[in-house]
Amino acid sequence: MLPDDPIGIFDSGVGGLTIMRQVVDVLPHENIIYFADTARCPYGNKSPEIVTQYVLENASFLLSKKIKLLIIACFTAASHAFDILQKRLPIPVIGVVENSLKNVTSKRIAILATTGTIQSGVIQSLILKKEPSTVLFPVACPLFTPLIEEGLIDHPATRLIVAHTLEALKNKGIDTALLACTHYPLIRPLIQDCLGPSVQLIEPSRNCAIEARDWLASKNLLNLQKKKPTHTFYTSGESEKFRHLTNLLLGIEKNRNAC
Ligand code: DGL
């Protein structure tokens, strides 16, 4: 394993770019390979067995690119398959679940996630293990990811669906909402408008990037190159649509090698 080797990141679609942009910010010299499994997105309505199979396939694709570290930038994937991946892979794996809980201090927390993540119960049990008196309000938001993948980021239809989905949280007295799907920070303003300014929104991207930096530093694997790093994108779906969407969401144009 060499410092020049890339970091691998995957998600079912564009959601993992919310993690990638923090990785780029914290580790600006690292080469990165991002894989979006757009052809099989969303993961949130699929069984744990199917998602685990997808996760193993995605990891093996990225391993074939000689990555030195893998970030699972997808809560659904991590909820179903983090442990199995950690056991099977010869490289370290960083997940979003634990990293999303590092800053949680509240006692009345809404968990916004895919149906699969909510049904897995993984986040609920980790929070309750840490603080048994926490009151949790899990809300499955199955329509958010498809709308985001269509690029309807600030669209009246998305606003309507957000309001309808989060209706269940009205008058519940929550002070924190965990954005437990990497797609949701992309519609953060809509969620914030709906829940009100007093509700704190939490997501794991910065903590994931910091964990990656700390691990690389501890193994002397930080890339100290002076030249521009390469950021390479792959999708299992339609490449033009993915390219358009990543540009729209992140303004990423530089160093695109493959898509
Ligand atoms: N971005 C994903 C997550 O964090 C997946 C959304 C989906 O594919 O349903 O859960």
Image: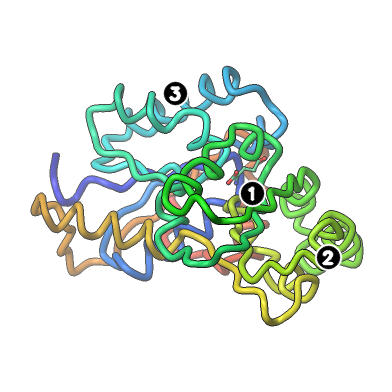
Indicate the quadrant where residue 201 lies.
Answer: bottom right
Q: Residues within 10 Å of mark 3 (few under 14, many from 20)?
A: some
Asked if residue 27 lies left or right of residue 43, the reply is left
Three-letter amino acid code at the position of disc 3? Leu
In the foreground, 146 or 256: 146
- Labels 1 and 2 touching (C-beta < 8 A): no
Residue lying at the far left in this picture: please name it.
Answer: 220
Q: Position of residue 14 (x, y in %)?
A: 60, 51
Residue in the picture at 50% in, 47% down: 128
Q: Is residue 244 above or below residue 88?
A: below
For discs 2 and 3, the disc positioned in front in the rendered view: 2
Kind of element beneath mark 3: helix
Residue in the picture at 26% in, 64% down: 29
Three-letter amino acid code at the position of disc 1? Phe
Residue in the picture at 26% in, 35% down: 66
- Sequence order check: which comes first, mark 2 or mark 3? 3
For discs 1 and 2, the disc positioned in front in the rendered view: 2
Give the labeled residue for mark 1: 242
Q: Is residue 46 above or below residue 165?
A: above
Residue in the picture at 74% in, 45% down: 140
In the foreground, 144 or 246: 144
Give the labeled residue for mark 3: 56
Picture disc at residue 170: 2
- Labels 2 and 3 touching (C-beta < 8 A): no
